[in-house]
Image: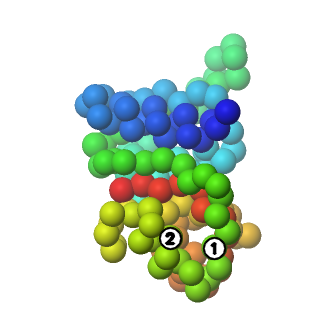
Amino acid sequence: MDTLANALNSMKVAETKGRSSSRVKPTSRLIKEVLQVLQDNGYITGCEYQTDAQGGFFTVTLNGKINDCGTIKPRFSVTALTWEKFEQRFLPSKDTGILIVSTPQGVMTHLQAKEKKTGGRLIAYTY
């Protein structure tokens, strides 16, 4: 069971149906950090954590900018010199979309990782 894949899929389905918000459940720290990266890059407007009897959920406010998003399985290891290969593989064109990567400095986009000249593990893509 991949909770991150479920979260991204529920957001994609809500975007496709034209809804303004999506409920993401179950929650984890990784999902929170991925949602923060998406918010920082303008793909979602906001996310709010709410508690309930079963552990809580995120209410994600959508803005209609997600065309496709998903997780990357297996989690490929990327060095600072091999970003181009994975950009061509997972993104539709150059300078369109982001790859979300887990690095020793935290979860960030592939563009930030390139600037810091670091590698990591690919987690997800969005465009």
Name the residue nearer the viewer: 23 or 49: 23
Mark 2, residue position: 86
Q: Which residue type carries mark 2?
A: Phe
Q: Position of residue 3 (x, y in %)?
A: 63, 36
Question: Which numbered dot is residue 21?
Answer: none
Q: Is residue 112 above or below residue 102?
A: below
Q: Position of residue 58 (x, y in %)?
A: 55, 32
Name the residue nearer the viewer: 62 or 72: 72
Q: Which residue type carries mark 1?
A: Val
Q: Position of residue 69 (x, y in %)?
A: 43, 48
Residue positioned 41% across, 71% down in the render: 88
Residue positioned 45% across, 71% down in the render: 87
Work out whether residue 40 can be spotted. no
Work out whether residue 68 can be spotted. yes
Q: Which image quadrant: the C terminus?
A: bottom left
Q: Which SS class for mark 1?
A: strand
Question: Which numbered dot is residue 78?
Answer: 1
Name the residue nearer the viewer: 90 or 7: 90
Mark 2 crowd level (few <14, some 14–19, many ≥20, 10 Å Cα): some
Q: Quadrant of residue 121?
A: bottom right
